Image (cartoon, grey):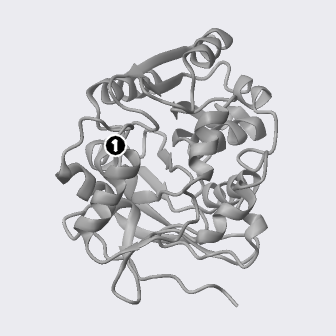
Amino acid sequence: MMTAQPAPVLNQTETGFANRFWSSRDGLKLHFRDYPGNSDSPPVLCLPGLTRNARDFSHLAERLTGQWRVICPDLRGRGDSAYAKDSATYNPLQYADDLSLLLEAEGIERFVVIGTSLGGLLAMLLAMGNSQRLAGVVLNDVGPEISSEGLERIRGYVGQGRSFPTWMHAARALEEGQGPVFPNYAIADWLAMAKRCMVVGGNGRIVFDYDMKIAEPFGQPGGEAGVDLWPAFQALDGRPVTVLRGELSDILSPAILKKMAKSLKDCDAVTVPQVGHAPMLDEPAAIAAIDRLLARVK
């Protein structure tokens, strides 16, 4: 039996997109936001991090929509996508297969990927399957090698299933846990983040908007990727690539960023000041880098 999901309470000010769905090979109903754009340009596929969802890209999508079609999927077990019957399917190879079916269903042959953390790993896996489909790639604070310190930090909080009585309690909990990642955030920023990554559950309490069982495969060594990703990263060679690194990141080290930049012919390596893992893509340095990449795609 499929695990029940909390009904999300969405930000009612968010407009300009259609809620659409596609099916996985194992029969899950998966959700994506579809922002309309110029059909002459390749669509932009925005892929979220491990515990996040399509709402993370709302500001980026609203900025690009009209000129670019922007597709923001909820990976299985997140947001408005169905929860998996088998937690072992919460792995990058399965996510990549799900996304391939989305692209097939939409008739998309060429696209740009903007991937945050896990989403960046998925961009590399998609490139390994057929790099010619990728018109350009933004890897947001992730690379083919991931810091063990950052992984242990993530393993420490994924799947805990905490809940909160009010949005302010939820925001304060995020601030307590992630304050060093976003040292310049005010309480309004933490509230906005809480409403992106949490929902009101069936009992009226605020809960994280993902299946707690995603922690089961991720908790095993190698579960975050499962394969050597340097060949997948090299598959991006010849594509316009931007790699963003949060200045305070404990996931992507400066040394790996430098190595990545030297490994590709066309790689724009950018450090986003005063944020950790991962930049929210509304920072001036991130906005400018994304715009440069999209200009190269055009």
Quadrant assignment, res 33: bottom left
Q: Front-most of 163 and 243?
A: 163
| Element class at badge 1 | loop
Q: Position of residue 281 (x, y in %)?
A: 36, 37
> Can I make out residue 252 in this image?
yes
Q: Is residue 106 left or right of residue 163?
A: right
Residue drawn at x 26%, y 27% as measured from the top left: 284
In the rendered image, the vertical position of residue 145 relative to residue 49, given as above or below: above
Split into 4 quadrants, where in the image is the N terminus? bottom right
Q: Is residue 271 left or right of residue 81?
A: left
Residue drawn at x 51%, y 82% as measured from the top left: 5
Q: Mark 1 sits on what residue? A: 179
Q: Position of residue 63 (x, y in %)?
A: 26, 43
Q: Front-most of 118 and 154?
A: 154
Q: Position of residue 130 (x, y in %)?
A: 74, 37
> Can I make out residue 35 in this image?
no
In the rendered image, the vertical position of residue 238 relative to residue 44, given as above or below: above
Split into 4 quadrants, where in the image is the C terminus? top left
Residue drawn at x 66%, y 76% as measured from the top left: 28
Q: Position of residue 74 (x, y in %)?
A: 52, 62
Residue drawn at x 55%, y 66% as measured from the top left: 160
Q: Is residue 168 left or right of residue 102?
A: left
Q: Residue furthest front?
A: 176
In the rendered image, the vertical position of residue 83 relative to residue 215, given as above or below: below
Looking at the picture, which amino acid does disc 1 mark?
A: Gly
Callout 1: few (<14), some (14-19), or many (20+) C-alpha neighbours within 10 Å?
A: some
Q: Is residue 24 left or right of residue 280?
A: right
